[in-house]
Amino acid sequence: MTSAAPTLWEQGEEPGHEVAALAVALLLTATTIDLALADALGLLFDLAFVTVCATAALRVRPADFFTVGVLPPLAMLSSLLLLAFAEPASIAHPEDGVVQATISGLSGHAIALVIGYLLCLGVLAVRNQVQNRSDQNRSGSPAPRRRTSG
């Protein structure tokens, strides 16, 4: 008997630390490209962020769901914090300090953060359900019920 090919929800087998590193690298690349095209961080970064969050949730192995589950807010914060140090005018007023620029950047990209985070958690939840079902199918039928005398 041949087993069916794994579904989209069952294919992720990458270690969590590799997925997190790749996600941050992709976000920094998107940030660089977005700033090369415009003076401020914009829609390109937001779209890349949402895409990276969903892709990370699909690529990670089930044992590392937690790593990717906490990744979106930390990745957004780290990207914006780097910009607050290097180029605060790209996410806030030029005269804002690091903390204010970071907070302004987070508030300016809050919709992308919420959408990316919810999408990431939703994909992880679906993958968890699919994995639980496939584990139940592999273990066979549930244990037989015991008969009681009576």
Image (cartoon, helix red, strand yellow):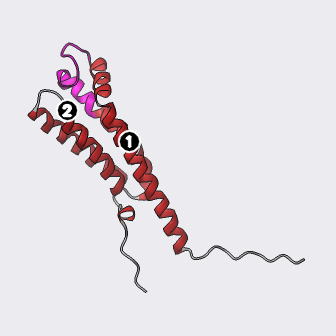
Tell me if residue 148 is in the magenta stretch. Answer: no
Instruction: Identify the disc placed on residue 37.
Output: none
Q: Please state which of residues 115 and 25 is positioned toward the viewer in this rendering.
A: 115
Give the mark nearer the N terminus: 2 vs 1: 2
List x then y, in percent, for residue 57. Answer: 36, 52
Q: Please name the residue shown 57% across and 76% down the image.
A: 140
> 6 left or right of 136?
left
Please give the residue where the numbered disc 1 appears in the rendered image.
117
**Tag 1: amino acid:** Tyr
Q: Please name the residue shown 9% across and 34% down the image.
A: 36
93, above or below 91, in the image? above
111, above or below 91, in the image? below
> 137 left or right of 87?
right
Q: Please name the residue shown 28% across and 47% down the image.
A: 52
List x then y, in percent, for residue 26. Answer: 22, 45
Figure quadrant of residue 139: bottom right
Tell me if residue 85 is in the magenta stretch. Answer: yes
> 124 left or right of 103?
right
Residue found at the far right of this picture: 150
Please give the residue where the numbered disc 2 appears in the rendered image.
42
Q: Which residues are magenta?
A: 79-97
> Is disc 2 placed on a helix, strand or loop?
loop
Q: Quadrant of the C terminus?
A: bottom right
120, above or below 106, in the image? below
> Is disc 1 placed on a helix, strand or loop?
helix
